[in-house]
Amino acid sequence: MTQNEYDTGVDPINAKYDLIRETLQSECSAEEFLEFGCPQCGGKLEVRVNLDGKRFFVRCRADSTHLSMHGKNEAPPEWFKNLPRNGWY
């Protein structure tokens, strides 16, 4: 029997979601973020920053049902300042 994600209990899609969130919560560069693709389709990701400059929203540009998550970075990287800012509900 070969070992796969079911044998190890690791879900590769969820692991990619976690990595994206953790990267945005760290001091990642814009280039680092742009290397990520949607875990479902490989498409481009979009990130927006809330008016406070710390909370962010990430989604798959092709289909937001693939990836759609919020997070917060208490010490956001400089490039967050250049992102579209808006409030969300």
Image (tube, grey):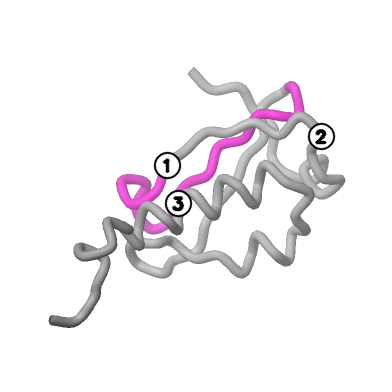
- Horizontally, residue 12 falls left or right of residue 17, namely left
What residue would you read off at disc 2? 75
Of badges 2 and 1, nearer the viewer stands 2
Q: Secondary structure at mark 3?
A: helix
Q: Earlier in the sequence, mark 2 or mark 1?
A: 1
Quarter containing the N terminus: bottom left
Please say whether residue 29 is one of the residues in the magenta stretch.
no
In front of the other: 23 or 31: 23
Q: Earlier in the sequence, mark 2 or mark 3?
A: 3
Q: Are marks 2 and 3 in contact (CB under 8 Å)?
A: no
Residue drawn at x 64%, y 27% as measured from the top left: 86
Q: Are marks 1 and 3 in contact (CB under 8 Å)?
A: no
The part of the image, by quadrant, that contains residue 42 is bottom left
- Most extreme residue toward the bottom is 2
In front of the other: 31 or 11: 11
Q: Amino acid at mark 1?
A: Ser
- Horizontally, residue 68 falls left or right of residue 9, namely right
Q: Secondary structure at mark 2?
A: loop
**Is residue 81 shown above or below 32?**
above
Question: Label 2, label 3: how many angstroms apart (C-alpha)?
Answer: 21 Å
What residue would you read off at disc 1? 68
- Horizontally, residue 25 falls left or right of residue 38, namely right
In front of the other: 65 or 86: 65
**Is residue 18 shown above or below 13?**
above
The location of residue 54, given as percent across then percent down, is 73, 29
What residue would you read off at disc 3? 17
The location of residue 78, given as percent across then percent down, is 86, 45
Q: Earlier in the sequence, mark 1 or mark 3?
A: 3
Question: Label 1, label 3: how many angstroms apart (C-alpha)?
Answer: 9 Å
Q: Amino acid at mark 2?
A: Ala
Look at the image and give the residue range highlighted in magenta.
52-68
Q: Amino acid at mark 3?
A: Tyr
